[in-house]
Amino acid sequence: MKAIGKQLAGAALLAMLAAPAFAAEHEIKMLNKGSDGETMVFEPSFLRIAPGDTVVFVPTDKSHQVDAVKEALPEGAEEFKGKLNQAVSVTLTIPGAYPVKCIPHLGMGMVGLIVVGDGVPDNLEQVKSIRLPKKSKDRLAADIAKAEAP
């Protein structure tokens, strides 16, 4: 009986260690013009991922960067900040909504939203209360609507 218990414990340990191998990697492009004709965009601007997945922000066009909007991140989540013209890779493990912005193009509406996990994020009201220029606020509102959809 002890041998079976050790085998089960070993199998459980292997399953936990292998779990990160199933994590996905997602790409968000930072663009001057998106496929829909909108200018200064993250594409996609809305992304729903599983906890432990990685998101890579790619500066496809020059003069872009990405920052997490720190005042609206899920509790316990770490802020991330990118540099101009450099890719940023983040692994998001805490469920919730992660609003992002491009500082140089914030006034032109360059914002996005990543939701980690299923359902409506607990911190969505915080995201709704972010102070942004009108065009960014409007674009973020469209992403929030997607986060609220079943």
Image: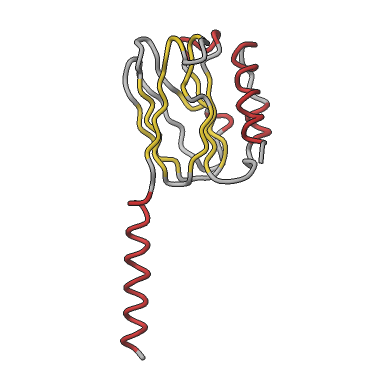
Which residue is most to the bottom? 1
* Quarter holding residue 27: top left
Left of 7 or right of it: where is 92?
right
Residue 26 pos. (x, y %): 40, 35
* Quarter holding residue 60: top left
Taking the spot 65% from the left edge, 32% from the top edge, the residue there is 126
Q: Is residue 37 above or below residue 50?
A: above
- Quarter occupied by the C terminus: top right
Taking the spot 57% from the left edge, 36% from the top edge, the residue there is 97
Count all numbered tags in the image, as a single digit: 0
- Quarter occupied by the N terminus: bottom left
Taking the spot 50% from the left edge, 9% from the top edge, the residue there is 39
Left of 54 or right of it: where is 71?
right
Which residue is most to the front? 36
Tell which of 121 and 61 is nearer to you. Answer: 61
Residue 139 pos. (x, y %): 60, 18
Left of 89 or right of it: where is 139?
right
Residue 64 pos. (x, y %): 40, 14
Q: Is residue 55 above or below residue 31?
A: below
Tell which of 128 and 44 is nearer to you. Answer: 44
Tell which of 102 and 40 is nearer to you. Answer: 40
Residue 21 pos. (x, y %): 33, 51
Q: How is the image coloured?
A: secondary structure
Left of 83 or right of it: where is 133?
right
* Quarter holding residue 57: top left
